[in-house]
Image: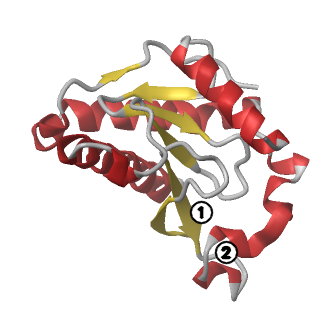
C-alpha cells in the first residue's frame, strides 16, 4: 500500500470516529470534507458511508443517494464560490477510486483565472503543483468552510433537497489548520 492510500485510510478512520476537523457536513450517504489543499478554492470531497470500491457495488438506492449528496455538495460549492467574486465559472465532479479503492467523489470549483489549457481539462492537468504547500488548508480558509457549512445547512433544509433525507450537518464551526 502506498503512502497516499495509507493517508486516505487514516483520514477515513478519523472521519468515522468523528475526529476529522475537515468534515463540513454529514449527509445520509457520507461525509463532506474540505480538500486538504485549496489550489482551486472550494474543493471538497464526499466520502461514502458504505464501504464500496465503486459506485456499482452499492444497491441502486444507495447509488442514487450518493449521487444526490454529491450533487448537493456541488450545489453548495457552486453557490458559495459564485458569491466569492473570484471569476467562478462552474463545478466539475469526479468519482474515481482508481488509486484509493474506496468510493468517494471530488467536487472542484473552476475559475476563469485558470490558465489555458488547464482550465479546459481535468484538475490532474496541473500535476503535483496543485498540492504545493502554499495551497494547504489552514486558518485563512475558515470563512470558506463556514460559508460551505452554512450553504449545505440551507440546502438540506430547503424543500427541494429534503428528498436526500436524513441529512444532518456537523454542529458548530470547527477550526481547521
Q: CA distance from mark 2 to mark 1?
A: 8 Å
Using the image, determine if residue 10 lies above or below residue 45.
above
Viewer-proximal residue, 145 or 25? Answer: 25
Q: Residue at x 70, y 87 (%)?
A: 116
Location of mark 1 (residue): 86
Query: Left or right: where does residue 32 sit relative to residue 28?
Result: right
Furthest residue in direction right, as rendered? 133
Disc marking residue 168? none
Helix, strand or loop at label 1? It is: loop
User: Percent x, y for residue 2?
Assistant: 82, 44
Viewer-proximal residue, 18 or 102? Answer: 102
Using the image, determine if residue 9 lies above or below residue 85.
above
User: Percent x, y for residue 148?
Assistant: 47, 38
Q: Residue at x 19, y 37 (%)?
A: 164
Q: Residue at x 68, y 37 (%)?
A: 141
- Give the position of the C terminus as an image quadrant: top right
Mark 2 / mark 1, whichever is N-terminal = 1
Using the image, determine if residue 85 lies above or below residue 72.
below
Q: Please rate how many residues cluster around mark 1, counting C-alpha atoms within 10 Å: few if below 14, some from 14 to 19, many from 20.
A: few
Query: Left or right: where does residue 59 sit relative to residue 36?
Result: left
Helix, strand or loop at label 2? It is: loop
Indicate the quadrant where residue 87 lies: bottom right
Using the image, determine if residue 87 lies above or below residue 25.
below
- Give the position of the N terminus as an image quadrant: top right
Q: Please rate how many residues cluster around mark 2, counting C-alpha atoms within 10 Å: few if below 14, some from 14 to 19, many from 20.
A: few
User: Percent x, y for residue 147?
Assistant: 48, 36
Indicate the quadrant where residue 59 lies: top left
CB under 8 Å between discs 2 and 1: yes
Q: Is residue 59 visible?
A: yes
User: Percent x, y for residue 103?
Assistant: 48, 45
Location of mark 2 (residue): 113
Numbered circles on residues, count? 2
Amino acid at each position: 500500500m502506498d503512502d497516499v492510500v495509507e493517508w486516505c485510510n487514516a483520514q477515513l478512520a478519523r472521519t468515522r470516529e468523528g475526529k476529522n476537523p475537515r468534515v463540513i457536513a454529514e449527509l445520509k450517504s457520507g461525509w463532506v470534507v474540505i480538500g486538504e489543499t485549496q489550489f482551486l478554492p472550494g474543493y471538497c470531497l464526499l466520502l461514502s458511508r458504505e464501504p464500496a470500491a465503486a459506485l456499482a457495488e452499492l444497491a441502486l438506492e444507495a447509488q442514487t443517494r450518493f449521487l444526490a449528496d454529491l450533487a448537493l455538495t456541488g450545489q453548495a460549492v457552486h453557490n458559495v464560490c459564485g458569491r466569492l467574486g473570484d471569476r467562478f465559472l462552474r463545478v466539475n465532479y469526479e468519482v474515481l477510486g482508481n488509486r484509493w479503492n474506496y468510493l468517494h467523489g471530488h467536487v472542484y470549483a473552476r475559475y476563469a483565472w485558470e490558465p489555458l489549457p488547464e482550465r479546459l481539462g481535468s484538475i490532474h492537468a496541473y500535476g503535483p503543483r496543485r498540492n504545493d504547500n502554499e495551497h494547504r488548508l489552514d486558518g485563512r480558509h475558515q470563512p470558506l468552510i463556514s460559508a460551505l457549512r452554512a450553504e449545505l445547512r440551507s440546502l438540506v433544509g430547503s424543500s427541494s433537497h429534503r428528498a436526500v433525507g436524513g441529512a444532518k450537518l456537523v454542529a458548530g464551526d470547527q477550526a481547521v489548520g
